[in-house]
Image: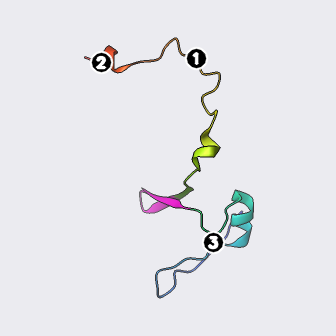
Amino acid sequence: MTARAKLSTRFRISIPKEVRVAQQWRAGQEFVFIPKGKGIMIMAVPDLTDLAGLARGADKRDYRDRKDRA
């Protein structure tokens, strides 16, 4: 998928519909901009409810706690 957009005189960019639909982005959602060389990576900030259960089933045996640090 190759989508293009122009930066407006007010420094705004409209995200093409095909990208919004593919990423399931919605109006009012918050994003972060991460510099990568001469470009940027845009990522949606997840809701806390989306993160619930993310670590379920993780192996705790090799967990490193602050007590383990020198």
Name the spot of residue 10 as percent of width and height, x first: 46, 85
Q: Which amino acid lies under the numbered mark 1 shown in the image of this protein?
A: Asp
- Residue annotated with mark 1: 59
Task: Tell me the quarter of the image containing the N terminus.
Answer: bottom right
Instruction: State the CA–CA distance, disc 1 to disc 3.
Output: 39 Å
Q: Which amino acid lies under the numbered mark 3 shown in the image of this protein?
A: Ile
Q: Nearer the viewer, residue 26 or 18?
A: 26
How many C-alpha atoms fall within 10 Å of the one at disc 3: few (<14), some, or many (≥20)?
few
Residue at (51, 79) in percent of width and height: 12
- Residue annotated with mark 2: 69
Q: Which amino acid lies under the numbered mark 2 shown in the image of this protein?
A: Arg
Q: Which residues are magenta?
A: 30-41
Instruction: State the CA–CA distance, disc 1 to disc 2.
Output: 20 Å
Residue at (46, 81) in percent of width and height: 11
Task: Tell me the quarter of the image containing the C terminus.
Answer: top left
Disc 1 to disc 2: CB gap under 8 Å: no
How many C-alpha atoms fall within 10 Å of the one at disc 1: few (<14), some, or many (≥20)?
few
- Residue annotated with mark 3: 15
Q: Main secondary structure of the magenta part?
A: strand
Q: Which residue lies most toward the top here?
A: 61
For mark 2, give the secondary structure.
loop
Closer to us: mark 2 or mark 3? Answer: 2
Name the spot of residue 4 as percent of width and height, x first: 63, 74
